[in-house]
Image (cartoon, rainbow, N blue to C red):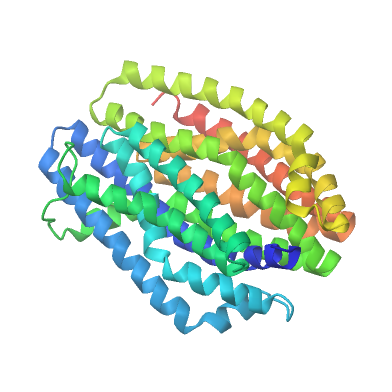
Amino acid sequence: MDTNALSSVNIVCPVINLIVGLGTMLATGGSAVVAKKMGHGHTEEARSNFTLIVLAGVMTGMLITAAGLLFLDEIIWGLGASEVLFPYCRDYLSIQLIFAAFNMMQVLYQNLFVTAGKPALGLALAVLAGIANIIFDYVFIVFMQMGIKGAAFGTGVGYMIPTMIGTLFFLTKSSELHFCKPNMDVSVLLKSCSNGASEMVSQCSAAVTTFLFNVTMMKLLGEDGVAAITVLIYSQFLLTTLYIGFSMGTAPIISYNYGSRNVRQLRKTIRICFCFIVGISLFVFLFSLFGGESIARVFAKNNRNVFEITKNGFIIFSFSFLFSGCNIFSSAFFTALSNGKASAAISFLRTFGFITVFLLTLPRYLKVTGVWLAVPLAEFFTLMLMVCLLCRHGKR
């Protein structure tokens, strides 16, 4: 794909953020509810809640597909697409909306495999989905010459694989947690949404800040600027998956120990988790700082201007990875302890509050440098808040 296609993907990214946000809210909040009940020994109730949460995810995805396709053009123009980028955006988003339910389901299963005691299977499916995405992207884009439509279909197939295998797994009743006839307990859904609100806030905030990034870079540097910020945002997504995956994987363990009142094991788990996060944060920072030029070349090898903009951005942007790991884990940690307020505060400020303030002010004085500084500064100030919250709740 050319850089215009790359830019268009970032233009419609807020819609994808919304879908993932809803799925993550149900997944993390519901996982905490289910894991806690399993820790108390209420297995039948946990199964019923689990089934209800999955059904809610399917229905939500179908509603998003219907509403999104109905108002497709209005959504794309509202997201700030230019005349040049509009046809690319339409081709990509229309296909992504068709796979909305699969997108939500694969997010749900990634969390619930851990709750079911099958983290290795969840990891294997996530890797398989990623490999399938790469293979089908190549087939659709290169071999079949489908362009940006091929990229959308490749991603959709990546959603389908963990969804279909996960559904079959939970239907076979081969684990303690499996599908059953659910009790329509609305309070379970409300509790799941409330407990996972911070993750929803995080994704919705990412949608708004992506929009602000696009608008700001379009004003400063045009389509090439949007392409450059797309590369950095995608790189951030790929590099922070280490933090997110680790946080999602350990959250049910924390919830289980919290539910069973195993305080000694809970403290040990938290201590090990923070040590791991600090170590991996340093690794990711160094990788981004010294490998940024190579990453920029992969995405923008045919556009020298986009390459230079992206390369220069990585030098500043890389510092965000020093702080984001602890922030992401802390948000998941407070969610696992059913402290939705603390978790939401961390997620909201790191992904929206601070970034919005910096994006609206710094570019006025520092131009493009101000755009690159927004994320590192937001992560740093959020880290300060996180330390305060841990000190406040540490004794408890």
- For image coordinates 23% across by 49% down, the residue present is 168
**Could you tell me which quadrant the C terminus lies in?**
top left
- For image coordinates 47% across by 37% down, the residue present is 245
Residue 13 is at least partly visible in this image? yes
264 relative to 234, above or below: above
Percent position of residue 319, x then y:
73, 36
- Residues 160 and 369: in front is 160
The single residue placed furthest to the front in the displayed view is 143
- Residues 225 and 381: in front is 225
Percent position of residue 53, x then y:
26, 55
- For image coordinates 42% across by 58% down, the residue present is 103
Residue 13 occupies quadrant: bottom right
Q: State left or right for residue 366 relative to residue 229.
A: right
Percent position of residue 5, x then y:
68, 67
Q: State left or right for residue 170 relative to residue 347.
A: left
268 relative to 9, above or below: above
Q: State left or right for residue 231 relative to residue 237.
A: right
**Could you tell me which quadrant the N terminus lies in?**
bottom right
